[in-house]
Image (cartoon, rainbow, N blue to C red):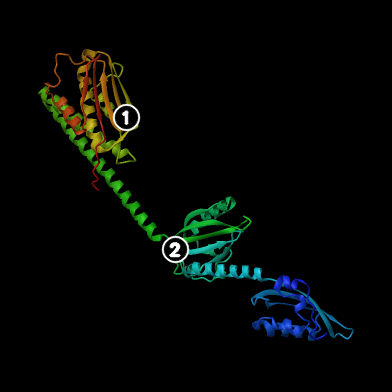
């Protein structure tokens, strides 16, 4: 090999800023421009290949450009030898890798930054490949499970999922993987002390620059304390619900006892007027009892299903008065309205008084007729109660404001309770209307 004889093509200026004619043929010129930190390694590798009989040499190093900056270069060369095996020439090419190296360094820096953030994050972070197998978990994950990354990689991390959660867990993951959709799920994961902790996991798809699906990345946060609080709250609500149902049940039973006592007293009393008054009291008590019965059977103890309550109350009054449905037809037309007990109770007692009056006075001497009961929900959030019949009606000579019967006094009293103004009409029988709003409910427990 001719020592020091070096020739360059025109790209020397294009890549590194040196004019070929200004560079001489001295090999030392090239060696002086190899970065000091790479100088010994590069020259030693050339000597090793030359002395070892090799035919090819290659290396990456930094080369100083004309402006004083260094370029990362890759150099590949063929060593030509004479018949005796002595090197006589090297023919090679240099390629500027600076941009590629910068991208690699930026990528390495980005990965290092991600790992630093992931390892200091207060959550468990994981990553899977396109095959759904785990390729990464952060330090908090390893600290949580107490296992090395080798055991968590692939499908190994699934070993820590609670046996009761594994099937649903995998089905969820397979389903979202097919659709490439984000997901959120809850499951139990075993901690290093053997205890299972509830995790809220969120995962999102990872996509390459070309938009190709490359797997999922996600995080897990420990929600065990929240789950315990939810369970405690749920149990407390169930207990409260059971207690309220029991209260309504006991109130209903106690009211039935009171009703039975009134019935016995009425049957034993010789005074028909007193017996009649006791009978009316019994019906009022039963109207209240039916309200509690409706709540007891309801799935919502904060609201009375008025359609069920009014039908039950109407049926009870028809039986109590021994009404033949072929003689007096009663129709109930009620919207799907739920009222709190503060509102439903006075509404039910008004209805009890009005229906009782209809059944006692509207159809004398076996007269046939109809009674219609309505409860309508209005657009302005009010409710209208209407009870009308086509019976004999109230004579025009009777001034309702001057009539002081207990029944009408109760209707007026409960109408005031509902903050409504009762209306009576006497066209073709009697019609009562009351428009009211649901009363404010006061929480007691």
Q: Given contact means CB atoms under 8 Å apart, are the residues at marks 2 and 1 in contact?
A: no
State which mark lies toward you, 2 or 1.
1
Among all residues in the image, which is located at the extreme right?
Answer: 83
Above-or-below relation of 332 to 207: above
Image quadrant where residue 370 sits: top left
> How far from the left and from the top, in percent, is residue 317?
24, 26
Q: Tally the numbered discs.
A: 2
The residue lying at 48 percent from left, 54 percent from top is 185
Residue at numbered disc 1: 378
Q: Residues within 10 Å of mark 2 (few under 14, many from 20)?
A: some
Q: Secondary structure at mark 1?
A: loop
Q: 326 or 114: nearer the eye? A: 114
Is 330 situated left or right of 144 in this image? left
The residue lying at 32 percent from left, 33 percent from top is 337
Is 184 situated left or right of 393 in this image? right
> How far from the left and from the top, in percent, is residue 365?
21, 13
């Amino acid at each position: 090999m001719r020592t020091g004889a070096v020739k360059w093509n025109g790209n020397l200026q294009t890549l590194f800023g040196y004019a070929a004619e200004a560079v001489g043929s001295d090999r030392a010129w090239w060696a002086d421009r190899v970065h000091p930190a790479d100088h010994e390694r590069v020259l030693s590798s050339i000597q090793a290949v030359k002395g070892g009989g090799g035919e090819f040499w290659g290396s990456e190093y930094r080369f100083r450009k004309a402006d004083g900056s260094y370029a990362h270069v890759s150099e590949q060369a063929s060593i030509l030898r004479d018949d005796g095996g002595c090197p006589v020439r090297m023919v090679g090419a240099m390629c500027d890798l600076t941009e590629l190296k910068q991208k690699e360094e930026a990528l390495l820096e980005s990965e290092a930054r991600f790992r630093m953030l992931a390892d200091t994050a207060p959550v468990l972070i994981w990553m899977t490949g396109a095959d759904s197998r785990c390729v990464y978990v952060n330090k908090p994950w390893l600290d949580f499970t107490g296992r090395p990354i080798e055991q968590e990689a692939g499908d190994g991390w699934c070993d820590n999922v609670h046996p009761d959660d594994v099937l649903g867990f995998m089905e969820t993951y397979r389903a979202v993987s097919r659709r490439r959709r984000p997901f959120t799920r809850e499951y139990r994961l075993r901690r290093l002390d053997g205890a299972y902790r509830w995790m809220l996991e969120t995962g999102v798809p990872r996509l390459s620059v070309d938009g190709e699906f490359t797997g999922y990345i996600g995080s897990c946060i420990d929600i065990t304390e929240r789950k315990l609080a939810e369970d405690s709250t749920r149990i407390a609500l169930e207990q409260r619900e059971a207690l309220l149902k029991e209260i309504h049940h006991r109130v209903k039973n106690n009211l039935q006892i009171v009703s039975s006592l009134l019935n016995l007293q009425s049957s034993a009393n010789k005074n028909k007027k007193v017996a009649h008054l006791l009978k009316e009291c019994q019906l009022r008590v039963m109207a209240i009892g039916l309200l509690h019965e409706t709540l007891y059977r309801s799935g919502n103890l904060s609201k009375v299903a008025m359609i069920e309550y009014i039908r039950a109350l109407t049926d009870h009054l028809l039986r109590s008065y021994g009404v033949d449905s072929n003689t007096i037809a009663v129709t109930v037309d009620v919207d799907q309205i739920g009222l709190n007990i503060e509102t439903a109770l006075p509404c039910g007692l008004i209805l009890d008084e009005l229906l009782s009056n209809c059944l006692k006075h509207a159809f004398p001497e076996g007269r046939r007729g109809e009674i219609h009961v309505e409860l309508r929900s209005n657009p302005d959030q009010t409710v209208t109660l209407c009870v009308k019949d086509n019976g004999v009606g109230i004579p025009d000579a009777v001034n309702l404001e001057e009539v002081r019967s207990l029944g009408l006094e109760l209707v007026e009293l409960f109408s005031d309770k509902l903050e409504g103004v009762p209306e009576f009409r006497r066209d073709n029988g009697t019609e009562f209307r009351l428009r009211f709003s649901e009363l404010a409910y006061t929480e007691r427990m």
